[in-house]
Amino acid sequence: MVYALWPRSDSPVAQPSDGPGSGQRGPSTAERRAADTPEALAPLRQDAALAACPAASGNSASDNSASGTAAGPLTGITLECIGDGSYLDVGQALAGRPALLNIWAYWCGPCAEELPYLQQYAERAGDAITVVTVHNDPNEANGLTRLTDYGVTLPGVQDGGGRVAAAVGAPNVLPVSVLISADGTVAKVLPQPFDSVDDIADAVRVNLGVDS
């Protein structure tokens, strides 16, 4: 099985722009390109019709403390919700419910095959677990276009600088799925694509104890 690698070097490697593949790129510190303005992204967001990102207030009944304060490595990481341009503290937004974060990029071939399974899994699991995509490339426009092409409407965040991957200690491959416990701690980092909805459900059951 081939994964899409991103080597960390001082000079970025050119990225393919005409379709998903197992290309390579160098690191980036930019969350998005300058060209990806709200005006430029608005029609793409409308076409993608992504689900709303989770909100901290929606999880208050089961937060990991009486005050609703989230813990774990994702707390304090503020990223843009790719679907509507709002911002969220990732750790706070996920607090109180198990979560699966899928780190992907528009040019990643294995990601293209896996994302529809994640969509189907999220529909099957319902409220048992929160599933969020993390677009790990500065080209936000292409990320939105790919999600539309794949028919994937999962909530997602834009993370061109790779802050989530760095926080959870993910290896330099794509895709990576990160299983987060309800208390915000990382239960498992899985650096390989899922092959089916049942494959995802098995990983969630084994690592998070959630039947879905």
Image (tube, helix red, strand yellow):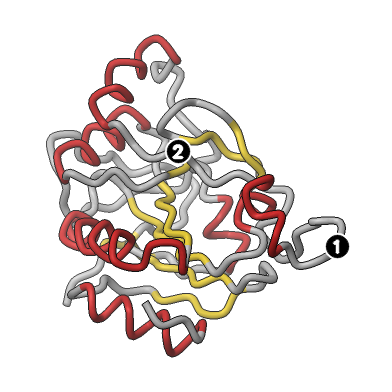
Residue at left offset 46%, top offset 56%: 8
Q: Residue furthest top?
A: 39
**Measuring 29% from the left and 59% from the top, which residue is drawn there?**
123
Among numbered discs 2 and 1, the one appearing first in the sequence: 2
Indicate the quadrant where residue 6 lies: bottom left
Residue 46's spot in the image, x, y percent? 29, 22
Query: How far across and how far down the image is residue 194, in percent?
Result: 25, 73
Q: Position of residue 204 (x, y in %)?
A: 42, 79
> How dense is the environment of label 2, judged by Cα within 10 Å: few (below 14), some, or many (20 and up)?
some
Q: Amino acid at mark 1?
A: Ala
Query: As displayed, is residue 145 above or below residue 161?
Result: above
Among the 4 quarters of the image, the one containing residue 3: bottom left
| Foreground: disc 2 or disc 1 | 1
Q: Residues within 10 Å of mark 1 (few under 14, many from 20)?
A: few
Q: Secondary structure at mark 1?
A: loop
What's the residue at 51%, 65% (across, down)? 99
Relative to 179, residue 127 above or below: above
* SS class, disc 2: loop
Outermost residue, right direction? 67
- Tell which of 200 and 52 is nearer to you: 52
Label pair 2/1, CB-CB below 8 angstroms:
no
Q: Is residue 8 above or below residue 155?
A: below
Q: Which residue is mark 2?
A: 52
Q: Is residue 80 above or below residue 207?
A: above
Quadrant in which the C terminus is drawn: bottom left
Q: Which mark is residue 12?
A: none
Observer-nearest of 199 and 38: 199
Q: CA distance from mark 2 to mark 1?
A: 25 Å
Residue at the disc numbered 1: 66
The amino acid type, in three-letter code, at marker 2 is Ala
